[in-house]
Each structure stands twice: as C-alpha cells, then as structure tokens.
Image (cartoon, grey):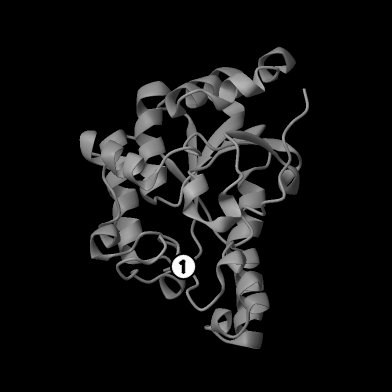
Amino acid sequence: MEKELKNFEELEQKTAEEILSWAVETFKDKVALASSFGAEDVVLVDMLSKISPRMKIFTLDTGRLPQETYSLIEEIRKRYQVNIEFYFPDTQRIEEMLNKYGPNLFYKSVELRRLCCEIRKVEPLQRALKGLSAWVCGLRRGQSVTRQEIKKIEVDDAHGGIYKLNPLADWSEKDVWDYIHKNNVPYNALHDKGYSSIGCSPCTRAIKPGEDIRAGRWWWESPEHKECGLHPYRLRRKKC
C-alpha cells in the first residue's frame, strides 16, 4: 500500500471514477461509502455500481430523517440491488438528552445542536468505521466555507488516521446534476421542492432563490458553524 500511496499528487488529478477504482483496488473490503443519500451520494452509488457493486455502503439513521430520504433508500436498494447498512444512535443517550434538554434542543444553542449531532451522528459513525482503512464521502469544495480546502484523499485524524476519500471534491453543483440527469440516477424528492442539502427533518429547510446551497441546513446559525462533527475540517495531508 505504501507504494500506492506515494502517488498522492497524481491521485489529485484523477477523475472521481478513477479515485473509486483506486480505492477498491488498494483497500479492498476495508473501504466503505458513507451515504446520507444527498445528490452527491447517489452519484457515488451509481459510479460504484459500475466499478464495485459489492462495496460496503452505510448510512447513519438519526431517527429524525424525512420520509423522502427513506423512500429514496428503498429505491436505491431495488435499483442497484445493494444492501445498505444502517447505524443508529445509542437509545440510552438519546433518552437522557431529550429528558434533560427537550426534543428541540438544537434550536437553543450551537453547543446543544452539536451535542445532538454528536449523539445521533458522530458516535454511530465511529462504530461504522471500525475496522476500515478508508471511507468515501460526497464532499465538495463548493458546498460551504468549511470545505473549500478539502483534497480528494486525506487522513482523518478524528477517526484513527484512516484515509478519507472525496472523489467529487473538485465537482461543481452543475457537474453533480448533469451526471444525475444523464445517468437517470434516483434522487431525493425534496430536491424538487427547493431543498439543496438534506439532513434531519427539523434541521433542514428549502432555500430561497440566490441563497447559498447550504443555507437550508441549521439556518439559524452562522456559516462557519455549519458542520455536524462528521467532517471536522482540521485534516492533514498524508506524508508518504
């Protein structure tokens, strides 16, 4: 693997499909796609169906997802004949949090919103990544101010130093939707209702014309706070 990882700079110039092919060849069954079934994620699912249909795909079910997301998951399962692994938050921690702060704690402060994300997303992700050498995400540089410096391959210090792959890092929003339409890829019905970025139901809204694509996520917070903890962008490049 060390020999393969010496080609870091070359990998930055590769296409998304080439990055995925490299990941499958390099990490074999120790790599997985993390999918919330947003537009970028369904693009990656479609690509993988042509490259490695047996690659592990998992999702974090927070317990507060919109029905449209579940409907899309079922459509993806049938269309691509893939198994989606679900990871849920710890029931006891959820009960303790809601009993102490109430069901809408995330509106009260950034700290409580992050606590909710920590329990519903970050902790389940840690379990999902256990035993893996790499994970694939649908992050793009153009999504938000916190993601402008992401690379196609990084080291995720927050999760034990495993590799984090962002094959669509250099894609534009237009690139994503052009691929979806060209390949007839299923996507979340909420996108047709003005939702550009879709997460938990109470933390997601449709955006208005001219608004940033992430404006509908945690809209009561300032842009620099709009991360849930899954992608704490203090990542470093791997030195090979």
Q: In this view, does 8 lie above or below 178?
A: above
Q: What element carries label 1?
A: loop
Q: Is residue 173 above or below residue 209?
A: above
Residue at (35%, 69%) from the top-left corner?
A: 207
Q: How crowded is mark 1: few (under 14 residues within 10 Å), some or many (20 or more)?
A: many
The quarter in which the N terminus is drawn is: top right
In percent of the image, x 29 and y 44: which residue is there? Answer: 177
* Relative image position of residue 214 (x, y in whole percent): 45, 62
- Which quarter of the figure has residue 122? bottom right
The quarter of the picture where the C terminus appears is: top right
Q: Can residue 198 be seen in this view?
A: yes
Residue type at tag 1: Arg
Residue 149, position as x, y percentages in the image: 61, 45
Residue 226 position in % (x across, y down): 56, 65
* Quarter location, residue 26: top right
The image quadrant of residue 81 is: top left
Residue 82 visible to an observer of this rendering: no
Closer to the camera in the image, 128 or 188 = 188
Q: Mark 1 points at which residue?
A: 217
- Left or right of 85? Residue 97 is right
Q: Which residue lies furthest to the front in this view?
A: 210
Q: Where is residue 210 in the image (x, y as percent from the top left)?
A: 34, 66
Q: Residue at x 41, y 22 (%)?
A: 51
In the foreground, 15 or 136: 15
Q: Is residue 236 left or right of residue 172?
A: right
217 relative to 126 in the view: left or right: left
What is the number of callouts on the image? 1
Outermost residue on the top side: it is 3
Q: In this view, does 117 lie above or below 159?
A: below
In the rendered structure, the answer to whether residue 98 lies left or right of residue 215 reads right
Residue occupying image coordinates x 63% and y 86%? 101
